[in-house]
Amino acid sequence: MARRRITHEQGREALGNLEQELATAVRYLLQELEIANPGKSLEIRVPPFGAVQCLEGQVHRRGTPPSVLELEPIEFVELCLGERSFDEIAQKASGVMANQAEGLFPLSGN
């Protein structure tokens, strides 16, 4: 069963009202990150709201992926919007593809 997509309109509205719409905003940005960077070699986790796999390279199927970036919801939103630099959170990335995570942020068009 396919996941329900968050429309751009819903995502932009959530980003404009983070205090009440943080979960939707995070899920929207995760969705956009996954679309813009297809693949399964790096997992971006934003507990408790979601996780996606992205970046071409080593394929990951089960268990802990070889590369992970786990962020708090607000820092993830700020990173996606360019309000925080990757250098500030770089220590949270681990694995063989972690050095390529920097190129994912900020998300263009958001």
Image: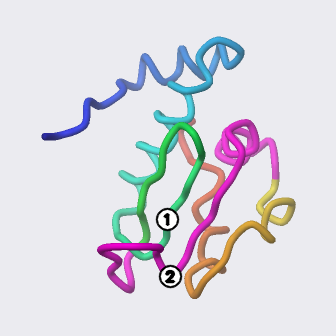
Query: How far across and how far down the image is residue 67, in percent?
Result: 55, 77
Q: Is 72 contained in the magenta span?
A: yes
Amino acid bearing label 2:
Pro
**Residue situated in front as seen by the camera: 93 or 10:** 93
Identify the image quadrant of residue 31: top left
Q: Which residue is mark 1?
A: 43
Give the residues in magenta. 56-84
Residue at screen point 59% across, 47% down: 46
Amino acid bearing label 1:
Glu
Is 65 drawn above or below residue 7 in the view shown? Answer: below
Q: Secondary structure at mark 2?
A: loop
Residue at screen point 48% across, 43% down: 50
Point out the residue furthest to the left here: 1
* Rendered image coloring scheme: rainbow
Query: Spatial distance from mark 1 to mark 2, Cα to Cα?
Result: 8 Å
Q: Which comes sooner in the sequence, label 1 or label 2? A: 1
